[in-house]
Image (cartoon, rainbow, N blue to C red):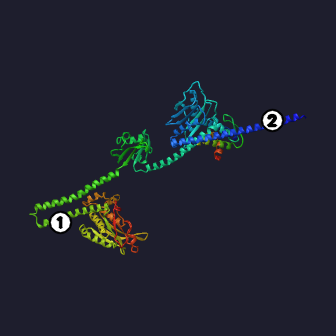
């Protein structure tokens, strides 16, 4: 073997090795380039994803308007992918479907229809209901269509937009060219964006739903009826109270409500008027099903731009305030009458005495003066009651409580009316339980309470008996209070009217008028204030008209052993020291 | 029809449904990435290896990542026509 051959052989081996090494290195480099390109693409996709999500967040604040989100996603497709058209489709009101197509490269009209049909099929499957092309409103914009250009979609993908588990729409990216074939690799980023945007909106939706539920609960618990309509006069909200007020079905339409108010209130007209004017419209008071309502119609404004968002109508029940106002008027009229009658009587008597003084003998003069005396005394009683009520309401009616024997003031008051009882042939008894503990009460004011109860019993009893009993009130075998009861066999009262006796306005005028007796009718109201002030209770019982009446009140048992200092500051319902003499204002407990 | 044949039909119908929703290429790309599943360009199952139930579960999961619960509801409609598979699939669905 020649040397040349050996050299050539070695050269050939080196050349071969070099070629192999070159190929290996090239392959490695190619792999690296592919890997780097993949990384770059991945990075670009991530950057794009973040950019689009940021844009959605900034431009919409993840608003609940999904169309805005769809527009942003579809509008950004060109940043990542070449395309001929990008389109979106969403469901509007009723069966209407909106189809919007942005044309980026010239395509034929048939291409657009091809896209629309494919999207309709996708959206139909997502919505799980058939959709027809006739219901679709088209909007095509961008590059001018060219009938000579491509009329068939070569590659496409659809992105369903799902928010709060509800299909909202579909985005479609389509191309007529061969340069790109859409697959999961280049489309995945759009699904990721759509999913993240949907999740963010869903979270916002959840927060809003929670807040809305709170608001609805508040609206439902309102004592007033309320409804709200949007600017298209579509009913947005109506609470249960309003359906009760109007007597409509549980979920009425605006037509049902307008119909229920027909002839009473022009709801539609008032709402239109509220839109035109900036001031709330206070309607005249109207009656609905035996109740009085004041209706307030006002605009709901956007806090930021002051744009009208809708109209709210409030149905405020003013039946009670109307009733109280009526009672107040009747009460005033009654009091004027109560005072004018004796004054008229006194004036007439004095005029008569003046005219006939020369002709009158001493007896006639004495009788007329006695009439003036008793009439003015009755009038003074009414005036005193009115003054007491005024003090009660001003919180200046003082009740001075002390530890004291209960039997003494009660026996004294009973004896004071004994002559009157005898005059009416009524039996009058007073029974005081033995070993009665001391009570905690106002020794002066208790007489006022007893005077009222006894004088009422006298007035309303023509035959039979008036009995006063004083005993311990036992609970669980232990004395808790001293119970004072005044029972008569008089005209009685229907049980459902008893509580009204303790009200300032609701005196039982009928009973009093029937008895032919007159007074301020405020005695029980004042008595309740006094008894409540020492921590007691007062109430009445009757089996009905003609069955007599029993009034009870309680006096707290004085606590001898309790340290005094800490109790001096007890409020009205507590029991202060038996030694100290706290002055108790009773304006809070005297509400009848 | 055997359970395997039933699954083949279900999987094919399921993929074809997703092709309508997402577009043929995207739905196909997802299907061919499922281990043990071989499908043609139209979503028809050519062969599968392993548990067909697990293949269907994987498919459902992948499509659900793109469109949420609507995918499951689509599958339920298909399963309804295959009662033998339906009960077994829904009872063991992860």
- Residue on which the image places disc 2: A15
Per the rendering, the mark at residue A370 is: 1
Rendering quarter of residue A233: top left
* Front one among A325 and A185: A185
**Residues beneath discs 1 and 2 located on the same chain:** yes
- Residue A342 percent across, percent down from the top left: 20, 60
**Furthest residue to the left?**
A358
| Mark nearer the N terminus (1 vs 2) | 2
Which SS class for mark 2? helix
Q: Is residue A567 left or right of residue A140?
A: left
> Disc 1 vs disc 2: which is toward the camera?
2
- Residue A102 percent across, percent down from the top left: 55, 32
Q: Residues within 10 Å of mark 2 (few under 14, many from 20)?
A: few
Chain of residue at mark 1: A
The reply to whether residue A190 is visible in this rendering is yes
Residue at horizontal 17%, vertical 65%?
Answer: A370
- Residue A153 percent across, percent down from the top left: 61, 30
Question: Do the numbered discs 1 and 2 sit on residues whose CB atoms are within 8 Å?
Answer: no
- Residue A373 percent across, percent down from the top left: 19, 65
Work out whether A336 lies above or below A76: below
Rendering quarter of residue A124: top right
């Amino acid at each position: 073997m020649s040397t040349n051959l050996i050299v050539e052989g070695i050269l050939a081996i080196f050349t071969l090795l070099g070629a192999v090494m070159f190929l290996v290195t090239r392959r490695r480099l190619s792999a690296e380039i592919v890997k780097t390109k993949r990384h770059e693409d991945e990075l670009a996709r991530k950057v794009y994803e973040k950019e689009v999500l940021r844009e959605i967040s900034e431009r919409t604040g993840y608003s609940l308007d999904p169309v805005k989100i769809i527009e942003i996603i579809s509008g950004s497709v060109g940043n990542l992918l070449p395309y001929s058209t990008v389109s979106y489709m969403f469901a509007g009101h009723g069966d209407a479907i909106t189809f919007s197509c942005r044309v980026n490269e010239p395509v034929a009209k048939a291409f657009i229809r091809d896209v629309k049909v494919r999207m309709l099929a996708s959206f139909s499957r997502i919505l799980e209901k058939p959709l027809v092309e006739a219901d679709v409103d088209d909007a095509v914009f961008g590059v001018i269509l060219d009938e000579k250009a491509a009329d068939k979609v070569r590659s496409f993908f659809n992105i369903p937009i799902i928010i709060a588990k509800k299909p909202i729409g579909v985005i479609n990216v389509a191309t007529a060219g061969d340069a790109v074939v859409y697959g999961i690799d280049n489309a995945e980023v759009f699904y990721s964006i759509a999913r993240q945007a949907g999740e963010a909106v869903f979270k916002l939706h959840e927060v809003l739903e929670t807040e809305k539920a709170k608001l609805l609960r508040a609206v439902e618990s309102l004592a007033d009826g309320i409804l709200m309509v949007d600017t298209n006069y579509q009913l947005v909200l109506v609470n249960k109270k309003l359906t009760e007020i109007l007597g409509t079905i549980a979920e009425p339409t605006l037509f049902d409500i307008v119909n229920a108010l027909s002839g009473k209130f022009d709801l539609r007209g008032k709402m239109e008027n509220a839109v035109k004017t900036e001031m709330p419209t206070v309607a005249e008071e109207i009656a609905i099903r035996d109740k009085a309502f004041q209706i307030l119609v006002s605009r709901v404004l956007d806090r930021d731009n002051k744009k009208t968002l809708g109209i709210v109508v409030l149905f405020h029940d003013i039946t009670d305030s109307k009733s109280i106002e009526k009672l107040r008027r009747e009460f005033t009229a009654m009091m004027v009458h109560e005072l004018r009658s004796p004054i008229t009587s006194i004036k007439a008597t004095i005029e008569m005495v003046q005219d006939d003084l020369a002709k009158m003998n001493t007896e006639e003069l004495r009788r007329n003066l006695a009439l003036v005396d008793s009439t003015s005394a009755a009038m003074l009683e009414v005036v005193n009651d009115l003054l007491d009520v005024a003090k009660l309401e001003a919180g200046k009616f003082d009740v001075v409580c002390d530890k004291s024997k209960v039997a003494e003031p009660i026996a004294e008051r009973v004896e004071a009316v004994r002559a009157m009882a005898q005059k009416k042939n009524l039996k009058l008894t007073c029974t005081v339980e033995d070993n009665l503990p001391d009570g905690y009460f106002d020794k002066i004011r208790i007489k006022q309470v007893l005077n009222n109860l006894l004088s009422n019993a006298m007035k309303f009893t023509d035959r039979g008996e008036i009995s006063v009993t004083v005993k311990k009130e036992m609970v669980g075998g232990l004395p808790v209070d001293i119970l004072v009861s005044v029972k008569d066999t008089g005209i009685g009262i229907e049980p459902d009217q008893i509580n009204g006796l303790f009200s300032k306005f609701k005196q039982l005028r009928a009973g009093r008028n029937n008895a032919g007796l007159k007074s301020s009718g405020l005695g029980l109201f004042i008595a309740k204030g006094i008894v409540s002030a020492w921590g007691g209770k007062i109430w009445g019982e009757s089996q009905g008209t003609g069955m007599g009446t029993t009034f009870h009140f309680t006096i707290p048992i004085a606590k001898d052993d309790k340290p005094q200092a800490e109790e001096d500051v007890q409020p009205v319902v507590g029991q202060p020291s038996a030694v100290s003499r706290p002055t108790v204002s009773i304006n809070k407990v005297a509400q009848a | 029809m055997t359970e395997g044949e039933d699954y083949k039909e279900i999987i094919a119908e399921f993929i074809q449904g997703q092709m309508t929703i997402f577009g043929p290429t995207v739905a196909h790309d997802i299907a061919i990435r499922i281990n043990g599943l071989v499908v043609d360009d139209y979503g028809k199952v050519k062969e599968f290896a392993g548990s067909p139930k697990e293949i269907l579960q994987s498919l459902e999961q992948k499509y659900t990542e793109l469109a949420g619960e609507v995918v499951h509801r689509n599958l339920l409609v298909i399963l309804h026509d295959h009662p033998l598979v339906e009960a077994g699939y829904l009872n063991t669905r992860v």
